[in-house]
Amino acid sequence: MQLFDLCTYTVRLANQTDFAGWRDAARNLVLNDVEPQEIAWIVDADDHAASQLPAMPTVGQLKVSRDFIERAEVAFCHRDPERFALLYRLLWRMRSEPELLKIASDPDVGWFEAVEKAVGRDMHKMRAFVRFRQIGEGEDERYVAWFEPEHFIVERNAPFFARRFTGMRWSILTPFLSAHWDRAELTFTPGAHKHGLPADDAAEALWRTYYENIFNPARLKTRAMQKEMPKKYWRNLPEALLIPDLVAGAGAAAREMIEKMPTIPPAHHAKIQAKHWLTSRVSASGEGGADAHSLAALRKAAKGCQRCPLWHDATQTVFGEGPEEAAVVFVGEQPGDQEDIAGRPFVGPAGKMFDAVLEEAAIDRRETYVTNAVKHFKFEPRGKRRIHLKPNAGEIQTCRWWLDRELALIRPSLVVALGATAAQSLLGKVIPVTKMRGQLIKRDDGLRIFLTIHPSFILRIRGSAEQETERNRFLKDMQAVKGLIAS
């Protein structure tokens, strides 16, 4: 004998998500004072069998809060086979206990809250981990995804995907139910099998590249990641193939980030600033260097430069350094974090790269003059870090006043523009350096300008092989510079 044969009433629901059928039957039964244990709830019953319900009473009214109905509809999507009976029991009890849902210690309320949260988490996972693959082209183009939900959430979640991917024709296949969107209407069909899913498409390769580049090893928390992205979902995620290697290399990558991370100014930052302003005998505009007849006098005048607002937050002016009779002048963009603190150009990571390549190219840095197009560090505070910001055209033009005077005193036979900012300062216009690198341009005044990249460009390349290739190209540029110095 089956359990429902012992019950007074049998309710036959059309499917696992037939909330409307449950709601109508539950309302009838509560108004007829039918106790929970008298009801059997059945899903997928014989199409010809009808629910056994009492006649709807003509008097009486069932008052239920909108909040309960909305939450019950969510809980209804849970896989618990007892959910129909448990929800009815809550409804039955609320008639005499209107504040029931506020009693957190009640077992029925505890179950209700737990299944509601479980369904919500499953809906979130579906939105986060569905990955579409393209099939067909042109008029036949559509997108297909496979997902294995824990609960019966497809119908409830499908409108989200219809709103988010309105212009796509897509299908989300699951073992229980499949959803389809034709750019106008949502439809549902029975569950499907994963073997019908198409192979990887070009978009997945692009997504893996993007994921690898945004992966932040310093913020990796493996347990938290697996909690939010359980391994059961990995087999359907294109980026999952990268995760083991990214996790394994996270420690080394994080240490590399820390080594390159900008530092906050030291405690004596304000003292350095004050010293420079007090010892400088120039006006606030910095134009006191106009009559300077040596690099030493020009450097002293530049200490008090306030020609643009960058001086206000920078630690100090970072002027060029090198012999006044240098045959070649290297011009970079602006001082970085470490240069700002040390007061010298090219002493940070890019400077170390620069020095190493110069040595390989047989160029003695001590015989060259090294400076920047902009003399103050431009940055954006981010917590305790100072993040480099590119100087704008106005700042480049304003600071060109100092660069022109450096060049006028040194009179080099060759100037090397390290990057686009330096090229813009030297030539007065924006130059596509990556396309024109290696070219020699002669200015109207006869000065030769050699174009190449800034060494920091090499450091920003993630792949070791690609970084080594770019470093070799920079070395060839410096070897060309060596030949031009001698010519």
Image (cartoon, rainbow, N blue to C red):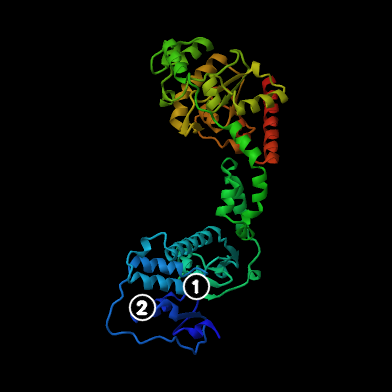
Left or right relative to 350: residue 305? left
Secondary structure type for disc 1: loop
Asked where in the image residue 203 lies, by quadrant, the reply is bottom right
Mark nearer the N terminus (2 vs 1) = 2
Which residue is at the front of the view, 484 or 43?
A: 43
Judged from this view, the residue extending furthest toward the left is 59
Asked where in the image residue 238 lies, by quadrant, the reply is bottom right
Amino acid marked by disc 2: Val
Secondary structure type for disc 2: helix
Amino acid marked by disc 1: Glu
Left or right relative to 445: residue 97? left
Asked where in the image residue 1 lies, by quadrant, the reply is bottom right
Say above or below: 81 vs 429.
Answer: below
Q: Label for residue 82? A: 1
Which residue is at the front of the view, 331 or 350?
A: 350
Q: Residues within 10 Å of mark 2 (few under 14, many from 20)?
A: some
| Residue at (59% x, 64% y) in the render | 134
Which residue is at the front of the view, 417 or 161?
A: 161
Horizontal and vertical percent position of residue 395 = 45, 28
Q: Name the residue beneath numbered marker 2.
A: 30
Horizontal and vertical percent position of residue 73 = 42, 69
Left or right relative to 362: residue 256? left
